[in-house]
Amino acid sequence: MENEMGLTIDGCTFISCGTAVRAPSTIDIVAKNTVIQGCQKGFDLFDPEVMHKLDIPTDVNPEDIKAVIAELKKHPNATDQEMTETVARSKLGTVLGATERVTKVAASLIAIVKTGVSLWPDA
């Protein structure tokens, strides 16, 4: 993926929101004269390449992906079909919508769980 353009945030106020700014980690961000107060997360930077390779829309909250991975890890002896159904029932599955897309993403997440690969340091 190509490097993103820059983002300048000047004179903005974010109060009591979920996430103030969500952007790809490849973007240059300049924030000045800006207040972020009482938000769950000030800046949420994601790796667009990981999202692209997993065929997950970049507007999906990484916490939803982490939640699915955590749920899959709870049931290491589940069949691939059972794990796919877990993904389909999750918030991520709802966002993905189409069955074939859920199945494709589920296959990737199942492989990640079974091989022990970590997408994030805390996942």
Image (cartoon, rainbow, N blue to C red):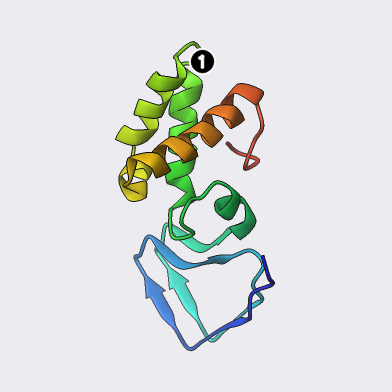
Q: Residue at x 48, y 40 (%)?
A: 105
- Is the residue 58 above or below the residue 109 in the image? below
Element carrying mark 1:
loop
Q: Position of residue 102 (x, y in %)?
A: 40, 40
Q: Residue at x 46, y 25 (%)?
A: 72
Q: Residue at x 35, y 65 (%)?
A: 17
Which residue corresponds to mark 1? Answer: 76
Left or right, 89 with reference to 29: left
Q: Nearer the viewer, residue 87 or 68?
A: 87
Q: Position of residue 92 (x, y in %)?
A: 38, 44
- Quarter of the view holding residue 111: top right
Q: Position of residue 120 (x, y in %)?
A: 62, 43
Q: Nearer the viewer, residue 6 or 36?
A: 6
- Is the residue 59 above or below the residue 86 in the image? below
Kind of residue at disc 1: Pro
Q: Residue most toward the front?
A: 100
Where does the N terminus fall, quadrant-wise?
bottom right
